[in-house]
Amino acid sequence: MKQDIQTIADIKILVDQFYGTVRQDSLLGPIFQERIQDRWAQHLEKMYRFWQTILLDEHTYFGSPFPPHIPLPIEAKHFDHWLLLFEATVDRLYKGEKAEEAKWRAQKMAQMFQFKKEYFNTNPKKKPLL
């Protein structure tokens, strides 16, 4: 029986499983690999803190998640695929209120990042607020 996301250990399992899938994915894997290269441990640690802050209300992430995405060669299909992989990972591992919240927050984040990415692509002289 699946449990809900409750602890940082649960967050780490989710993040590790998700990014394990992303790294093997033919659409997203090369983009992540080019950007992250050999810094996967640092990236995963940052993602643990990000999701811990969002889902567990334990404020361990301090940063601006969008700006690193501005230069990436990504568009709507990438965000849609990222969301599909994320939701599938959550559904495979967890069930409950926090699992549903994780998927909802990922949906909203993907929408916002996509809108912001489109804006900065059409307005290249604009700078994001950090």
Image (spheres, rainbow, N blue to C red):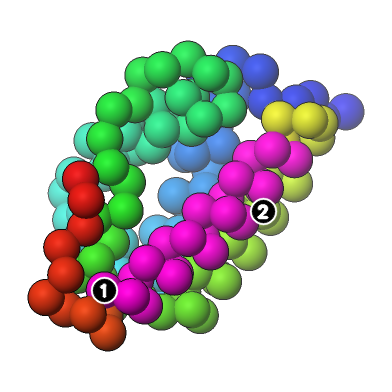
Asked if one can make out residue 19 in the rendered structure from this viewpoint, the answer is: yes
Question: Start and end of the magenta stretch?
Answer: 100-120
Which sits in the foreground, 65 or 29?
65
- Picture coordinates of residue 14, whole percent (x, y): 56, 37
Magenta stretch encompasses residue 118: yes
Q: Nearer the viewer, mark 1 or mark 2?
A: 1
At which x and y percent is residue 28? Answer: 41, 69
Disc 1 marks a residue whose amino acid type is: Phe
- For label 1, the residue is 120
Which mark is on residue 4?
Answer: none
Q: Quadrant of the N terminus?
A: top right
At 44% from the left and 69% from the top, the residue drawn is 114
User: In this picture, is 103 found above or below 53?
Assistant: below
The kind of residue on which mark 2 rests is Glu
Distance in Å between CA atoms under marks 1 and 2: 27 Å
Tell me if mark 2 has few (under 14), some (14-19) or many (20+) residues whose alpha carbon lies within 10 angstroms of its own: some
Q: Residue at x 16, y 49 (%)?
A: 38
Whether residue 43 sits left or right of residue 28 in the image: it is left
| Residue hosting label 2 | 87
Majority SS type along the magenta span = helix
